C-alpha cells in the first residue's frame, strides 16, 4: 500500500459518516459535490458494512424459518 493510499484510509477513518450522510441528504446539490475522496471512501465502507450485516441477517432469518418448518 502506498503512502497516499494510507493517508486516504487514515482520513476516511476519521470521517463521521452519520454526520456526512445527514449533510448530503440536507443539501445534496452542494454537499455531495463538495465531498472529499476520504468522505467518499468512508461512505463506501459504511455501505459495504451495512450490506454485510443485512445479508447475514437475511441468512439468519431464513435459517430460523427453516428450523420452524422442518
Image (cartoon, helix red, strand yellow):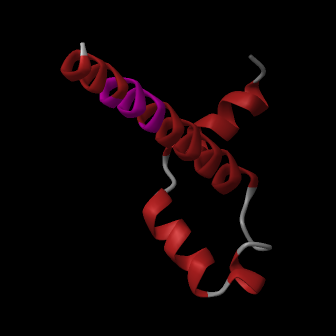
Camera-nearest residue between 21 and 4: 21
Q: Quadrant of residue 25?
A: bottom right
Which residue extends farthest left? 68
Q: Quadrant of residue 65?
A: top left
The x and y percentages for residue 59 are 40, 24
Depicted 15 relative to depicted 11: above or below: below
The x and y percentages for residue 66 are 30, 19
Is the magenta region chiefly helix, strand or loop?
helix
Q: Is residue 56 magenta?
A: yes
Q: What residue sits 54% from the left and 67% below the top?
A: 20
Looking at the image, residue 53 sits to the left or right of residue 3; the answer is left
Q: What residue sits 25% from the left and 20% below the top?
A: 69
Looking at the image, residue 20 sits to the left or right of residue 61; the answer is right
Depicted 8 relative to depicted 32: above or below: above
Q: Quadrant of residue 30?
A: bottom right
Depicted 35 relative to depicted 55: above or below: below
Q: What residue sits 49% from the left and 49% below the top?
A: 14
Q: What residue sits 48% from the left and 42% below the top?
A: 50
Depicted 8 relative to depicted 5: above or below: below
- Quarter of the image that includes the N terminus: top right
The x and y percentages for residue 27 are 65, 87
- Quarter of the image that includes the C terminus: top left
Magenta part of the chain: 54-61
Which residue extends farthest top? 70
Amino acid at each position: 500500500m502506498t503512502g497516499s493510499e494510507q493517508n486516504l484510509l487514515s482520513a476516511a477513518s476519521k470521517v463521521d459518516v452519520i454526520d456526512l450522510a445527514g449533510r448530503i441528504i440536507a443539501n445534496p446539490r452542494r454537499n455531495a459535490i463538495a465531498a472529499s475522496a476520504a468522505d467518499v471512501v468512508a461512505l463506501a465502507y459504511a455501505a459495504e458494512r451495512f450490506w454485510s450485516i443485512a445479508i447475514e441477517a437475511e441468512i439468519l432469518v431464513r435459517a430460523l424459518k427453516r428450523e420452524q418448518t422442518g
